[in-house]
Each structure stands twice: as C-alpha cells, then as structure tokens.
Image: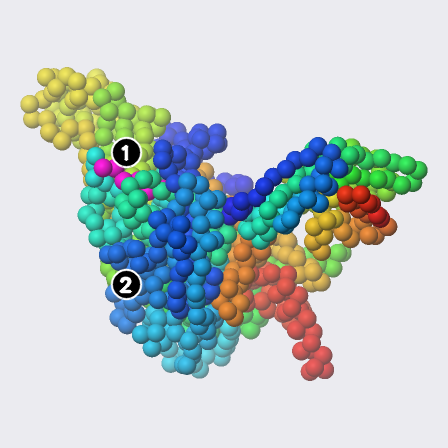
Amino acid sequence: MPLADSDSSSDAKAGSGQGVGARLLRKEDDRFMRGRGQYVADIRLAGLQDVAFVRSPLAHARITAIHVPERYRDVVFTAADLVGVKPIRAVSGLPGFKISEQPVLATGKVRHVGELVAMCVAPTRAEAEDIAASVILDLEELPAVYDMLKAREAGTALVHEHWGDNIFLEGAFEVDIAPAFDAPIKVTREISTARQCMSPLEGRGVVAAFDHRLDQLTLYTGAQMPHIVRNGLSDCLDIEQGRIRIVSPDIGGGFGHKGILLPEEVCLAWLAMRKGHIVRWIEDRREHLTASANCREHHYDITVYADRDGRLRGIDCEATVDSGAYSSYPFSACLEAAQVASILPGPYRMPAYRCKTFSVATNKCPILPYRGVARTGVCFALEIMLDAVAVECGIEPGEVRLRNLVSPDEMPFDNITKKHFDSGDYPQAMRRALAAIDIAAVRDRQRRGEPDGRLIGVGLSIYCEQAAHGTSVYAGWGIPMVPGHEQANARMTPDGGLEIRVGVHSHGQGLETTLTQIAYEILGIDTAKVRVVHGDTAITPYSTGTWGSRSIVMAGGAVATACIEIGERAKHIGAKLLQLDPATVTLHGGRVHGPNSSVALSEIAHTWYRRPQDLPPDVDPGGLESTSGYKPQRDSGTFSYAAHAVTVAVDPDLGDVEILDYVIVEDGGVLVNPMIVDGQIYGGLAQGIGTALYEEMPFDTAGQPLATTLADYLLPGATEVPEPRLDHMETPSPYTMFGVKGIGEGGAIAPPAAIANAVNDALRPLGVELRHSPISPHRIVGAILASREAERSTA
Amino acid sequence: MKAGAFAYERPSDLNAALCLMAKATGMVKIIAGGQSLGPMLNLRLVEPELIVDITGLSELKQAERSGDELVIGACITHGDIEDGRIPDVTRGAMQRVAGAIAYRAVRNRGTIGGSLSHADPAADWVSALSALGARVMLRRICDQRR
C-alpha cells in the first residue's frame, strides 16, 4: 500500500503509459497466473530417465568402501567412474585464500551431510531411490567441525587437512582506530545470525540431453547465470564451450540459490554424455533443506565508540562467517566475509574503523550469497549497535541515526571504506519513516501500557544497497567471474516488432516487462510488440547473469544502447523514404518524423527486410539489428537505500511477536516500473521477516542438520507478513542510463535489524536485549527468564 | 522422497480388511487420509510391505448417536466434524477442535481414526478426546474390545 503522494514524479513520467516510470502490468504474468510457466520439472523429453543420489549420511567421514549390488553395476556411478572430471574450484584472488576442491562425487572423504557419493539412474525417480537405498557406504566417522568459532581454534578437526587450519581467508581493514578508544561512550556486543536455507518455491533441477547432430550437450537447469554455468561446466568436464548449451527456463525463485554451479549439474552432464540418453534430477525438499547450499550464518564481536551526543567515533569489529565445506562457484567462500569488512560502516560517517574477518570452513553445506548477501547480517549487527548507543546516550534511536547519516550535500560521498555513494538523501528517508510510523504516538502508547499485558516496541533500520557494481569491484575480489560490459541484442522483425535478447535471466524481477519499457522509451514500439528472450546460451549474448541487483542497470542500459543504435539506422532509412535530409528527422512515438511528414518504424522495417531496393545507397549494412554493450559511467555501483520502521507487540509470557505496523521509505533512483519495485519490496520483506523471526537451520555437534522438513524449518506464511506502507523517493543515479539504480535485494536487508530493535525496545523495561536471529519465542522467553534470574541473584 | 515399493489393497468390507491383515507376514500399514503416513512413506521412515486402504469401508464412514453417546467411524474426516456433517454430543466442542487442525486441505482428507492410531503427541484429537472421556473400540479378525 503506497503512502499518499509518494510517487507523483513517476506518475508524471508515466504519461506515455508504457515507458520508464509506467506501472505497466507484467507481461510474464499471463502465463504464470494461468499456471503455464515452464520449469525444469515440467520438461518432458522422450526417453528421459531419473537420477537419485546416494548422499553422505555423515558430516565428516572417510570413505572406506562403496558397495554397489552387482545387478545395479551399470546404473550406479561413483567418483571412480568419473575419469577426467575435475572438481569444482572457486578460487579468490584475495591474498591468503585457501583453495578447496569440491569433487562432484565424493572422493576420499565426505565433508558435509548430503554430499554426493553416487548417482543412480532408473526409468523413474522412485526406482532410482530404490537403487540408491541398496548402495551401502562404509564410512569411518571423523569429528565434525560444526561451530565456526570453535573451528578457528587450534587443535580442532580439519575440514581440509592440508590447510593446517579451517580458515578459507582472513581479512583486515583499518583506518586509524586508536583515536576512537578514548571516546566517552563504548558499547560492546556479540551478535549473530542463524544459518538459513533460501527455500525458493522451486528447488533445483537439471535435465541433460546430448544432441549428436549438433555434437552438443544441452543442460536444462534453473540458473540465474546460464553463461557462468557453461564456463564452470566446460572447466569441470574439459569440453569446448561450443559443445555446451545451457537453457534456463522459468525459475520459481532464485534469490542467489540458483547462482551456483552444482555438482549435480556436472554429474548429469557427464551422465547424459556417458549413457547417451536424457537424464533428469529434480531436487526434493528434503535434499534442499539438508544437502543444498546454505546462507547467512554470521557472528560479530563488535564495539562502537561514540561521543555523548551519539556521534560515532569509530567501530571495531571481528566478524566470522561460516562458509561451509567448499568454496562455491563462482562467488567463492570468502565473498560474504570479505564484504562484511567493506560494507559494515554503511551510510554513516565515522573517523575510525577496524574490522577483521574470517571465512571459516565447517562440515556443513557450502554457503551462497542470499538476497542482500552480507548486508542483512551487517545491517543487523550495526543497527542493533546504534540502538545500544542511543540507550547509552539517552537519545532517541532515530536521532542517533540522523546525527551520523551522510547528508545529501556530501553526495557523491566516499565513506570510510571508500565505498562511493552516487546519490541520495538518507536523513530524509529516515525522517519520513519516523513521521510515518509516528514515533511520538508509539511512545505515548508505551507509557499507557496494553490491556492484554503485551509490550509495545518500535524499531528502525537503514542500509545502503550497492548494486550493479562491475569490473573494478569484482576484479578486486578475483573470483572466477568478473562482469564487464553487459550486452543486449535488439532486432526489429519484418512486421515492425522488436526482439530483445539478453544474457541475464528474469525470475521474478519482471525483466520481460521492464526491458520492453526501456525499448519503448527509446523507439516508441508498443510493448505488446516487444519480446524479451533470455535463459539460453545459444541465443543470448554472454552475461554474468542476474545477481547483485544488477540487471535493470546493466541489461537495461544495454537494451537502451542497442535500441538507440537501431533508432539511428531507422532514422537514416526513414529520411530516405520521406525524401528528407537525415539530419532533419527525429524519432518518437514509433515513427520517424520530418517537418511535415512521418513514416512508421514498421514501414522502415518492411523496407529493410522485404523491399531493400528502396533503401538509401549508403544504408548501414548492420540493418535493424544491433548487439551493443553497456557499462555505467562509473562501475563502482549504484547505491539504493531504505529506512524501515516497525511497531511490534511482544507477549512476554509466550515470546510471540506481532508486527503491528511496518513502514518502508525507499529510494531506488528512477524506477522503471514502480509497481514491480513494490512487489520486489514486498517479497524481500517476507524473506527479511523469515530471517528476523523464523528461519533457522540448526546443526548438532555431529554436524547433522536438524530442520529436515518444512515442519521444522519455519517459513513465514501469509499470516505472518503484514502489508507494509511504502513511500518512494527517487534520487537519480548520476552514472546510469535514465538514473536507475538496482533495488532487487533491499527488501530483505533491513527487516531483521528493524524487528530486533523493535523487540528490544519493547523488552527494555525487562532488561532484555536480543542479538541473535531468528528472534524466536524460545529465545525471547529464554532471555526474559535469564534476566529475571540475574536480577534475583544480584538482589 | 518417493516411497519404497509396497503392495496395496483396498478391501470393501471390514472383515476382508481384517483378513488381509491377519494373513500378512511382513509389516502392514493402514491408510485412510494419509496425512501422516504419506510423508512418512515418502521419507522412507516406514517401508511397509502391504498397505491396506480402508477408505472403501462404509462401516467406518458412519457416525451414529444413541442417547448421549456418539459413535464415530474411523474414516470420518476432520472436515466432516468441522462442517457439522455428523451429529454432535459435545455442544460444539469437537467442531471447534476439528476446525483448528492444520489447514483445510489436511482436514478434507485426515481422519479421526488415523489421528488416534498414529497418536502423535502433538495431535489435537489425542488430548481433546481424552478430555471428553471418549472410548476407542478396536476390532480384530474375530474379536472386538473397548
């Protein structure tokens, strides 16, 4: 529900009805709403057989034998069969990074529960599971590395013995921390976020087929980055890229979970080539929860220094991230922790800063960057600390933030870690959020008390979301994937339509709509006649894919660039048809106009394709098709941001948290389609609420995952997600086409911090402060009981 | 998450069902709504050799009131009770319990007999029916007891 008067600027731009700023209904929803989306599991190909995997039941063990019944010898494959297949290696160029080799089928050791040991193929999945159940593993159990902090200690079991420790990478960043030490306010806390599973509606799935005519493997896989999957597959299988085609059909939720090269993908590709028939593996929910990639497990030892008026003097932090057993491809095991050091200060000014980071290997599934990546944990840690500072100073939390946020007249702004903020008015976003949540009214209500005994609290958080950061940033990380120019292909059809081909993938972002809006903005071709083609390496330009909130900036810029190129060529042809000097014509509304006459683009397209005899002799031979590349003027990223404010009621006896009101004031630059952005914020908020209150994948001391069904792994449902009140600001980015910024992840970043602060605000009279997500009833009641116990023992 | 292989029978009267169970040598599981057994089969937490589907037994789909006592067949669903399709002697108490079990799709298929025989301590009927002083009638091939 948008707040009143929030989007007048986009309404003004929406005058054309279809261009940048229009709240156009999503083109892709016609098939989705009718249940006609096509996902990997919907693909039916003749002769298809199903694969089930034998997975490790133990977190850490030596494999002494794998017993395959004689009758299944031809349909069960182990590492010994995969001759020449290389392990998955995601190396970071950061100094000191230790390399893990992730075998596609386990060799020697298993390093997490669910690791692939053997694959079994049969006409149906049930039969394949029967075969898998008949395979016996002899495993010699080793002590499991199940706790990232203990894993850092000397003498602990080792996930990769030859490393000598369990640290993928240790990092450090410092700007002159010493002067902060004499600050009058010093607040120290330990803060952590639980390990999560991303839990998209659709899990992973792979169908692999080999085409002998084309001498090409086709891998159907729900991939956010099909071209990157091809890179990785080519490396592991040591076959030419031209012999691999990746098709990524509709995807039921990506969020980062589909931005990884899976060992299952390598296995199925190998199997299709070996067996010569089509093979399929569809991840089930149990595999997803116990054996697929995890995310989000952070730990912070953090001290904030401030003056008595709440102004920050410095932050000193040691952050640890549980990276799991292997470095996942392409983002690596260290991106998350290394990012923590660079993004922790966020949009706040401070003169001193120090952060040490540890990416730790454990006997758990590898981690992946989940929507918001490290930002959700960082925002949780820093915003809880700002509230603690506010309490220590006796100042309203909102006021502490306003005193430290970068001001609009400092833009563009380089913060203490040299993050380059392109534009924005952070204090205004915070002030609007404070006004909308009506802090004064909440404080009054708190003083009055609730008739039902519940406690009311209000919480804030603000963050920045660096998006579409490009070559210079990723070259620094040195991971297997560095984004360069983003390309798009635009091609007019002989009947005047437009086809756009992009290497990014759309799976909820609405790119099949927004990219047509951008084309409309340039060429004026009705969006109904513009088609966006994506998800197939055979027919799209190379791209690192959809991640990092980059697609509207990068692919949107590329589509605009390609359309501008076509527009210029069309103007030249149009001028000839109008018998005018090309310098005197303009292009708008889908027509080339001279002073007194005009010709439609469809007529120009007809001429190029079907009546070339009418073309000017100096026509551009490239015609009405262009593949063009784009990079923003600066590739350090766009910075969108939002202030979140939430009011909650907490039941101190049951630990139940009800969200009473939720306000989001966001600034994503110029919005191509504000309706789609609203949807992205709603979705992100739902996931943020999951992180804040429900989702947790606990492990026991043997490294066994304990939430193995959705009855144990709690996800927020419709009744747990309130309708937020949204307010948009639109500060254009000075560096991008149309001034757009990436916005896709933001909704999931701020809610855990805001909700934690609200719960803490409610429970402050009880002397309770929660600093570990999810803030479950168990943790709330436990903290209240512990506080009472402490009070009794001091009394 | 696919069940292992098992034999399946759907008898049409109670005696036939009891005979099937008496004759079987391996593990037998009875299925009605399948709301607990279904996932357990798929997770291979149970791997019975024979599954006897009792949804064809009309004797178990009846509910009769005699005086203050109500006899409910095992195959009556939570939804039947929630919607008031069977008589009531509890002044709406059972209706309220039924309406709070899981969500509607589960209540459409899940049965009161299945809930009691599975006896998950978190299940509603186990405690609610104890509180209401209910008794359970058990049948075997040539015997019945309360």
Q: Is residue A131 left or right of residue A708?
A: left
- Residue at 29% x, 49% y is A270
Query: Where in the figure is residue A245, as x and y percent of width and height?
Result: 26, 41
Number of dots carrying numbers: 2
- Residue at 24% x, 44% y is A244
Chain letter, disc 1 residue? A
Query: Where in the figure is residue A594, as x and y percent of width and height?
Result: 19, 21
- Residue at 31% x, 63% y is A101
Query: Where in the figure is residue A250, as x and y percent of width and height?
Result: 39, 38
What residue sits right under mark 1 in the picture? A500
Amino acid at dot 1 = Ile
Locate the C terminus of chain A by quadrant.
Answer: bottom right
Of the two numbered discs 2 and 1 in the rendering, the one whose residue sits closer to the viewer: 2
Q: On the same chain: label 2 and label 1? A: yes
Amino acid at dot 2 = Val
Q: Camera-side residue: A82 or A689?
A: A82
What residue sits right under mark 2 in the picture? A91
Find the magenta span and give its range.
Answer: A207-212
Crowding near the residue tagged with mark 1, few <14, some 14–19, many ≥20 C-alpha atoms within 10 Å: many
Position of residue A580 relative to residue A760, above or below, is above
